[in-house]
Amino acid sequence: MFEWIQNFADWVIYGIFGVVQGTHLGDALNFFVYDTLKILFLLLIITFLMGIVNAYFPIDRIRNFLSRNKLYGGEYLMASTFGAVTPFCSCSSVPLFIGFVKGGIPLGVTFAFLVTSPLVNEVAVAIFLGMFGFKTTLIYVVSGILLGVVSGFILGKMNLEPLLTEWVRKLQANTERERETFELEKMTFVQRLPGIWRESFGIVKSVVLYVMIGIGIGAAMHGYVPEGFFETYIGKDTWYAVPLAVILGVPMYANAAGIVPVIQVFVAKGILIGTSLAFMMAVVGLSIPEATLLKKVMTTKLIAIFFGVVTACIILSGYVFNAVL
Amino acid sequence: MKTIKILGTSCAKCKQMESIVRSTIAEMGVEATVEKIEDIEKIMEYNVLVTPVLVIDEEIKIKGFVPSSAQVKALLA
């Protein structure tokens, strides 16, 4: 599928720049050009497709559906899946969270959404696809959604409502459904496409630097870090590798765009894929900036519990991956 | 005289909407006040689930995406 990009990279590096094929420098440069182009191509396609989905995604109706129907646990899966397809823009997470609570949706279900929303996003998916291939990407997405379900379910059982900030609790007390009176101006599919295209182009533009830095570091490491380097330090029997990776990952706030290419090299050089996936989830799914955003709606204690439960679930999933994959 | 409000925290899309709306108004010479509302409590009074939101004369016109200048023009005309 990406042969044409590889051919182009070969042509640029070995042909135009005349770097000798098979040298460290030549391979690293080729890897850099190829990966950057491949990822940008995937990013454009996937953000555009997700843009179309989002433009037609009936957010209001889904919320009303969730608040009206008892689904015997299915609502967790629905909210979590919903979190996976909602837009990349993290600033919508808080309004959505409040909207859910206000709509009378149980807190646990709302948390399921809140966990998956940053964890599974189109940028991460596109880059995963480019660096790890289809199977690992599918595993990442499915386990991300399951992680939302499990942590949402646990948090839902903990009766955390009193720990919401006061004004949110007030909103919750007089739940009301959104008046569905505002109708978006009617636009045809073709009329909306330029806007969607502009938006996905904007997303790609905003991460392109991170992609290049990430792949640059990755390319350098590929050429110079010896094969199996990490195995000597963090081997298969190192039980603390997963929790260590996750705990290091939580306070880190990196764009998925920058972190995945680096992780790919870690995997290539001997770190277990489960440990790497868990690290990735911790970096992308939980972050300090997110916590500050949430301070508006949750007490510090609730944020701590929320982060604690999700962290524990990520660690657990890391062990499961390492055992299964 | 139109009252225009842009609801949104300080995210990229919200800033984009604000600058497009402001430049379109200037270009059209429409008399309007533009207010950016960043306080989440105030935003939630409009009962929206996604940001950014464009409110013209207290009516929600656009939510969740950044409009083009032409779309804003059509809404202000």
Image (cartoon, rainbow, N blue to C red):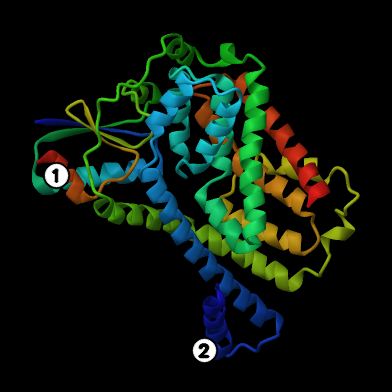
Task: Give above or below for A282 relative to A42.
Answer: above
Question: Can residue A252 be seen here?
Answer: no
- Residue B74: give its label: 1
- Residue A72: give its label: none
* Real-space CA distance between mark 2 and mark 1, rounded to the nearest whole angstrom: 49 Å
Q: Position of residue A237 (x, y in %)?
A: 91, 49
Question: Can residue A106 be seen here?
Answer: yes
> Mark 2 falls within which chain?
A
Which residue lies at the image location 48% right of the left edge and 39% below the top edge?
Answer: A90
Secondary structure beneath dot 1 equals: helix
Amino acid type at image mark 2: Ile
Task: Give above or below for A260 relative to A220.
Answer: above
Task: Give above or below for B45 relative to A241.
Answer: above
Within the image, what quadrant is residue B10 found in? top left
Query: What residue is pinned by disc 2?
Result: A16
Which residue lies at the image location 17% right of the left edge and 47% below the top edge?
Answer: B24
Dot 2, how many residues are within 10 Å of its Cα: few (below 14), some (14-19), or many (20+)? few
- Asked if marks 2 and 1 touch (Cβ < 8 Å), the reply is no
